[in-house]
Every structure is written in structure tokens, then in C-alpha cells.
């Protein structure tokens, strides 16, 4: 179900053409110089693509960022203080080669798991930020993602801070069995307590937000923002196609589809994301409100 | 008693004669008034709910319904709920909270339904909301897995003060078939996946996810529906009496902590 999800991410916005297309001739594009959009096939200079914070200039596909890149364009300079950076998962169901696979990913990504959490400020306003990084096992949620996120939210609850979570995930981490499923309950519980205290929780759905993450903390934001054209859904597209025995429209399970069906508040482009979040934080500045009331 | 493998248990719960919640309800409860609809969209046959009496204690019952024949299965969509099913469950849970009735959830589902309409109506949001709301629901909640506990579709009725599992029931993050097909690209290795995934009642007690295993008669619950129902009723009466005596703030704290502790990591 999930594997299918990610195969199709590449082609879903230009499905038919992409299917007909021959495998890309890699030699045509010097690596590191040019960016070829996986959605529309458009090509631009890597330099331009980077300048646009990895948004395709042809089709506006907001491609995936690393957690580090996301924090750099969201938080005030040098304001980010990381929590629990050294936390590593163990192997709750003794899944073969799970730990080895993680060792390999650690050296490739410089991450210890699929989420980075911490405290930061945005235009001077303090908040807790969590960013999922899809390079690490498609940012699936296991013990570490669940624990780090729960701790970050609990910290925000104790210190009366807003929480902003940038979601991206293939869902629960199957290699951790039912333990991974329970992380949905753990994180949602932390959100519930934060919410009961009257604090602001914003989720920003980025590419791809699916499965158990959609079915837990990602969908619980007071305000749910999505980046343009990203994939958002619960079940895998092919599973659904298998059930209904027909092809789904290209924009099925896109940010735009979710907006139209009422499950996303707004679609915000990356270039105005920081500004938007800052304004929303300002409108919810709880300390000011309390002073007025008192 | 010799220990069965996860696969052998899978064969027991897939047995066509395996009793469903419809068989148990008349034996466990003296009265049951079914309540329909989510008040938003419609009535989902995959989830049945209502008000019941358990040895004189008023309770709310919410259950995923497997069919016993093709007609029942059509009506209940093979126990695969749509968002309106989860929203009906939440409506009834909130009603239970209002009247201080304990909630009993029976889990028996391959998973939430995967379809276009389910996505359009927010399957993810519906499950998320239930998980969050059940976490802070101010009344005791007991969940029992009767057969299959499939993924988020089960967890939407599975956030509780105590999770019990029938001896042969299974509870997993994804079906063993799905697991094999994703991780090994080979759905036929379902049997092997079943053992590796650690999804039996014993496994889940060891992992701190389930608290109680309810005995089934030798060979499985289909061999004696009455005995199984009585075992469930006896457990429910005991646990509900016990949980009802706990101060609600303490109970909610214990519920939170129960999930908060689940995870395996090092620092």
C-alpha cells in the first residue's frame, strides 16, 4: 500500500505523459547542474531551483526539503535549539536488519531518525518546531518520531508555547509493528493536552503526508496549512484503484483536493510560508491576550 | 495448553463460524438499544453503537461489525468503516461522557475502508479526531479485540483505559499480507509476516499495548459462543466496576501514561 504511494508521487500530476515517457536519459543532464522536475518533467538550472527554495519554476511543485533546509527558511537565524537530537530507535519486534538499515541511513542523511524537533523563534516569537525528513525511511513514524514529537509538544504545553509541525510521512513504521501504531495515540494525546491548555497548534502538510500521520497529529491542527500540489491522503492510491477497479484523477489526494473537500484550511506557497506563520502566531499571541484579560 | 502460532490463530479468526459482536451482545447485555447515524452524513453499517445494560450498569457499546453471511457483510462493508462510522462512534462516546456511562468498544476490522468517498470525507481526519477525543474522554473506556485489529481503523476505537484481547485475536499495524507485499514485495509470504510482526495477544501484552487476555474455549470461540460471551461479560463487569471507582482525573492521567510509555528507543 505505502510503497505504491511513493512510486506514484513522481507521476501523479502528469500521469499519462509520464507513463508514455521513455526512461530519462541521465546523461543528457549533467548532475548537480540542472534540476529535472519529477512532476512536470521541466528542466531548470539547479542554482535557480535552489534560489526558489526547491520549487519547480514550471509547475510550482513544492519538492521535498530536508529538515535542516526547512528550519533554515522558517526560523529566525540561529534561533533553533534542538531537542533530543541523539535519540535512536531500538528494535521492538526484532525485525531483521532494522538496526543495520538505520545505521546506513544515519551516515547518508546525518539524522538519527525521521524527525527534528526543537525550540525556535519566528520573527521574534518563541515556538516549538518539529520537522519530518522524508529521506529517513520515508519519515515513517516509529518510537523515536512518536517520542520526540510527544516530548516537544509536552515542552510547549509546560511553557505555554505554540507548536508548528511540518508533516511528511509514509505512515506508521511497519518495522516496529504495533508499537508504531501506538505512536499515533501517544502523539495525539500530547496534542490533546496542549489544546486543552488553549495553545496554538499549526500543522503544515508537506510532500507526502499520508497513512498513520494523516490519521493522527497531522490532521489535528487548529490551523492546517498545505504546500501547493503535495500529496495528502490516508490510503494508498493503488489500493483504492484496486478496490474501485478504475484509474483515479490526477489531482486525487493533492493539497488542492483536500482543500476542496474541507480538510485543509489554506494552501500557502513556500515563499510566503514564514510570513504567514509569523502573522498567525501574532494573532494568537497568548501572553498579550492574558495581560488584557487580567 | 499448547501454544498456537500467529498463523494458526489467523486461521481460527478467519473461520466462517467465528462469532461476531452480534452473537455476543444478546448474551453479554440484558438490554441493547441500537442508535444510528453520525448526525453529519449518514449511518455506517460497519460500526454499530448503542446503549446497553451490563448486569444493571448502563453502558455505551460501540462495535465494528463483521457479517456472518454475504448479506450481513454487504450491509457492514466487511467491517471496514467509512469516516461516518468513526464519527458515529465519537458521537456516541460523547453522549456516554455526558451521562457518565462507561464505553465498551469491540474491535473487529481488517482496517478502515480504502476508497474515493472515504478519502473525500476525511478518513484520516475522522480517525485522528477519535484518537484524540478518546484520549480525554471523561468516562472509563474499555476496548476488546474480538478477531482482527487492523491498523488505524482499529485504533480509532482502541484508545482506552484497558485493552483486552480474545485469546486468538490479532492486532497489527497493517495486515500481514500488506506487510509482506510492501516490505518483501511478495504478498504470498503472508504466513511468514504473521509470525515476524508480533501481533498475538501474548505479544501485545509483552509490548505493553494490551492488558488482558480473555480465554477462548479450546479450538476457538466458535466452539462455544456462550462460554466466550460469559468470559467477556465477567471481565467487563470486573474492570468497569473497578475503573468507575477511580477519580476521573486520575483515570485520564493513567490513560495518557499508558500510551506515553509505549516505544523502544535509546538516548
Image: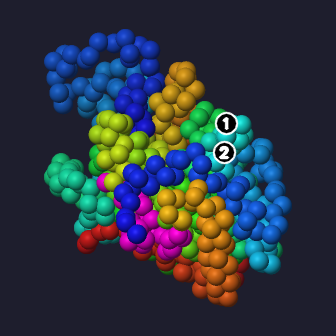
Image position, residue A101 (x, y; %)? 20, 51
Magenta range is: B196-215
* Chain bearing mark 2: B
Query: Which residue: 40% across, 24% down?
Result: A11
Q: Does residue A152 appear anywhere in the picture?
A: no
* Chain bearing mark 1: B
Image position, residue B221 (x, y; %)? 57, 60
SS at circle 1: helix
Query: Which residue: 49% across, 33% down?
Result: A239
Looking at the rendering, in which quadrant would you find the C terminus of chain A?
bottom right
Q: Pick whichever, A238 or A203, lies toward us.
A: A238
Q: Is residue A7 above or below residue A40?
A: below
Q: Pick whichever, A1 or A253, lies toward us.
A: A1
Q: Pick whichever, B88 or B27, lies toward us.
A: B27
Q: Is residue B180 above or below residue B27?
A: above
Query: Which residue: 29% across, 12% down?
Result: A22
Amino acid at each position: 500500500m505505502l510503497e505504491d504511494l511513493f512510486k506514484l508521487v513522481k507521476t501523479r500530476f502528469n500521469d499519462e505523459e509520464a507513463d508514455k515517457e521513455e526512461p530519462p536519459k541521465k546523461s543528457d543532464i549533467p548532475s548537480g547542474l540542472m534540476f529535472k522536475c519529477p512532476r512536470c518533467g521541466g528542466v531548470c538550472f539547479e542554482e535557480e531551483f535552489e534560489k526558489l527554495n526547491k520549487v519547480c519554476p514550471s509547475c510550482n511543485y513544492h519538492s521535498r526539503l530536508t529538515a535542516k533546509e526547512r528550519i533554515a527558511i522558517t526560523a529566525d537565524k540561529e534561533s533553533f535549539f534542538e531537542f533530543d537530537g541523539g535519540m535512536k530507535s531500538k528494535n521492538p519486534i526484532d525485525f531483521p536488519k532494522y538496526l543495520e538499515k538505520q545505521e546506513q541511513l544515519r551516515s547518508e542523511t546525518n539524522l538519527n531518525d525521521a524527525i527534528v524537533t526543537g525550540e525556535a523563534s519566528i520573527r521574534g516569537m518563541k515556538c516549538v518546531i518539529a520537522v519530518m525528513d522524508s529521506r529517513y525511511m520515508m519519515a515513517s513514524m516509529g518510537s523515536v518520531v512518536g517520542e520526540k514529537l510527544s516530548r516537544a509538544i509536552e515542552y510547549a504545553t509546560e511553557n505555554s508555547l505554540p507548536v508548528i509541525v511540518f508533516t511528511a510521512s509514509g505512515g506508521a513504521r511497519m518495522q516496529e509493528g504495533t508499537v508504531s501504531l501506538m505512536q499515533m495515540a501517544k502523539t495525539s494525546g500530547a496534542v490533546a493536552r496542549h489544546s486543552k491548555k488553549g495553545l496554538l497548534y499549526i500543522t503544515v502538510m508537506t510532500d507526502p503526508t499520508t497513512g498513520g500521520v494523516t490519521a493522527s497529529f497531522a490532521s489535528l491542527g487548529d490551523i492546517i496549512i498545505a504546500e501547493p500540489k503535495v500529496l495528502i491522503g490516508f490510503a494508498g492510491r493503488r489500493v483504492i484503484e484496486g478496490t474501485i477497479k478504475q484509474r483515479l484523477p490526477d489531482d486525487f489526494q493533492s493539497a488542492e483536493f483536500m482543500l476542496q473537500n474541507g480538510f485543509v484550511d489554506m494552501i500557502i506557497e513556500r515563499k510566503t510560508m514564514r510570513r504567514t506563520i509569523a502573522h498567525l502566531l501574532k494573532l494568537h499571541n497568548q501572553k498579550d491576550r492574558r495581560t488584557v484579560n487580567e | 495448553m499448547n501454544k498456537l502460532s500467529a498463523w494458526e490463530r489467523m486461521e481460527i479468526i478467519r473461520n466462517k463460524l467465528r462469532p461476531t459482536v452480534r452473537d455476543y451482545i444478546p448474551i453479554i447485555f440484558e438490554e441493547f438499544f441500537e442508535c444510528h447515524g453520525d448526525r453529519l452524513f449518514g449511518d455506517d453499517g460497519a460500526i454499530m453503537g448503542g446503549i446497553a445494560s451490563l448486569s444493571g450498569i448502563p453502558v455505551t457499546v460501540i462495535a465494528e461489525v463483521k457479517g456472518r453471511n454475504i448479506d450481513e457483510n454487504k450491509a457492514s462493508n466487511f467491517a471496514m468503516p467509512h469516516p461516518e462510522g468513526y464519527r458515529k462512534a465519537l458521537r456516541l462516546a460523547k453522549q456516554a461522557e455526558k451521562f457518565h456511562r462507561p464505553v465498551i468498544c469491540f474491535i473487529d476490522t481488517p482496517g478502515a475502508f480504502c476508497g474515493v468517498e472515504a478519502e473525500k470525507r476525511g478518513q484520516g481526519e475522522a480517525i485522528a479526531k477519535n484518537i484524540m477525543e478518546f484520549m480525554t474522554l471523561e468516562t472509563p473506556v474499555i476496548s476488546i479485540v474480538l478477531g482482527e485489529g487492523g491498523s488505524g481503523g482499529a485504533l480509532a476505537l482502541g484508545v482506552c483505559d484497558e485493552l483486552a484481547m480474545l485469546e486468538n485475536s490479532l492486532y497489527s499495524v497493517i495486515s500481514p499480507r500488506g506487510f509482506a507485499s510492501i516490505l518483501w514485495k511478495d504478498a504470498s509470504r503472508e504466513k511468514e509476516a504473521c509470525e515476524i510482526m508480533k501481533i498475538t495477544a501474548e505479544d501485545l501484552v509483552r509490548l505493553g499495548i494490551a492488558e488482558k487476555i480473555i480465554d477462548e474455549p479450546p479450538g476457538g470461540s466458535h466452539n462455544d459462543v456462550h462460554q466466550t460471551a460469559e468470559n467477556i461479560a465477567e471481565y467487563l463487569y470486573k474492570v468497569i466496576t473497578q475503573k468507575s471507582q477511580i477519580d476521573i482525573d486520575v483515570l485520564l492521567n493513567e490513560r495518557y501514561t499508558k500510551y506515553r510509555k509505549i516505544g523502544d528507543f535509546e538516548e
